[in-house]
Image: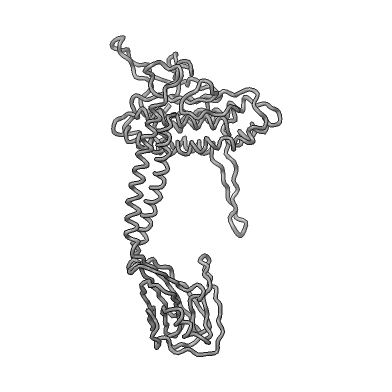
Amino acid sequence: MKPGFVIMLIFGAILSLLGFSLAIAGATAAVVNAQDDDGYLTSPARSFSVQTYALTSPRMGSIEIQDVPAEIGGVRLRAASTSAADVFIGIAPQADVDRYLAGVNHTELRNLDISPFRAVYRDIPGSGTPEAPGDQDFWASSAEGSGTQQIDWDLTSGRWAVVVMNADASPGVSVALQAGVRFAFLGPLAVGLLLVGLLILLTGLVLTVFGAIGLGRGTPPAPGAAPGTPVGASAPGAAAVPTAPGERIFPARLTGTLDEGLSRWLWLVKWILIFPHVVVLLFLWFGFFVTTIVAGFAILFTGRYPTAIFQFNVGVLRWSWRVSFYAYSALGTDRYPPFSLTSSADYPADLQVDYPQRLSHGLVLVKWWLLAIPHLVIVAAFTGSATTWRYDGDDWISNTAPSLIGVLVLVAAVILLFTGRYRRSLFDLILGINRWIFRVTVYTALFRDEYPPFRLDQGGGDTPARAQITPAAPAASDASVAPAGGPPSSMP
């Protein structure tokens, strides 16, 4: 692989993820800023009840604001009495509140648990009786009366406290409180984050696509392929070529050769050994996802899969299969996978996909999800963990069973550990399941229009598939060449 394009792909993936995160943050800020309450983000109303003269915010955790710019935002507080008394709510400097309630039995709100809701209080003893709060002149903002009372207060530097009392300064405060906050900068911040995020995302996607194209162009056809062989096509002799009428090969061919003399214990640590591959594949699969979308639009409008993108995406699948074959999808070899998108005649696992000369414009819209549903259900059964739920009287408990292919590979690994042998019949079954999975991947990733067969072709080599194919009409001349394969929408 060319280092420059690898760096471009990695850098593009990182920028794309960063831009996407910033765009999501901007969109979230825009939604918050659009709250239908005069721009305030408001909490639900919660009930508070104390037997003292006043309920205050905690002195040690009072609202301390330092060096705030003008018009930065504001706070909205609402209080509704849940008793017969009128309610008072106010916000004032902490020092003034301390003097007002000095020697008065009142309660500090120490903590709030949101789910489930629970208020934690601390009573401050005292024997004095406070004057009516509405008669005091130190409040920065206050309201009193029956029903719901509301105060709006612009954030200002200082140390502040919130006080809730009965308007007549009688003991026993019972109210429903609601708080809201407004930030004046939230709207511009949302727009800025969204625009910057989209710009970075677009830049990252462009770098990702060009990096993938560069890597695809630098990936040669399979070893031994003749000049002019379509990108992704296998070399002569790499797989059986149909010669009899009614016999053909699915255009995606997965192969794997079981190595002799496998280590009994190496599979126990392969999860560590493949870590470098996993890191690289994370970036490659991000590029695969992005370029598949690009290829989908190209197919929709031109009917062709861009060759450089095709070669890159096939290479990603090939790389993934080699790592899977080495690791826990087959455990078929102890030879470390190469860091390469290209085919290797020396490595015992390979994947070849024939390049399609034409693809259906319409199928690209439905085959990757709607038409593939039957296969996706089967693949989910092969690769997905089964989860069951039961209720023990207090809570729901889940039980998860491993995937089918995971169980088969584990059985093969245990047999290998104790006997030093890999059962050939078990290997053939595991390869057949992997072959089915990759055929479906090829179809859903838009490489081909031929529908994957509902067939478990076991064994390490991909063999011709029997199919009823109507013989083509005689050619008008010896120079004529009939198109290969059936119609794009055929489903063998």
- The residue sitting at 53% across, 85% down in the picture is 105
- The residue sitting at 68% across, 31% down in the picture is 417
User: Would you place residue 243 above or below residue 45 in this image?
Assistant: above
Across and down, in percent, residue 337 comes to 54, 29
Between residue 158 and residue 279, name the one nearer to us. Answer: 158
Between residue 388 and residue 86, name the one nearer to us. Answer: 86
Query: In the image, 126: left or right of 487?
Result: right
- The residue sitting at 62% across, 56% down in the picture is 392
Q: The N terminus appears in which quarter of the rendering?
A: top left
Across and down, in percent, residue 180 comes to 40, 69
Q: What's the image's color scheme?
A: one colour
User: Would you place residue 132 above or below residue 328 in this image?
Assistant: below
User: Would you place residue 254 above or below residue 283 in this image?
Assistant: above
Q: The C terminus appears in which quarter of the rendering?
A: top left
Asked whether residue 37 is in view, the answer is no
Q: Residue furthest top?
A: 478
Q: Residue furthest right?
A: 418
Between residue 167 and residue 273, name the one nearer to us. Answer: 273
Number of numbered discs overlaid on the protein picture: 0
Across and down, in percent, residue 147 comes to 39, 80
Q: Residue furthest front?
A: 67
Q: Quadrant of residue 332?
A: top right
Across and down, in percent, residue 231 comes to 39, 23
Asked whether residue 21 is in view, the answer is yes
User: Would you place residue 468 above or below residue 11 in this image?
Assistant: above
Q: Quadrant of residue 469?
A: top left
Query: In the image, 258: left or right of 55?
Result: right
Between residue 474 and residue 151, name the one nearer to us. Answer: 151
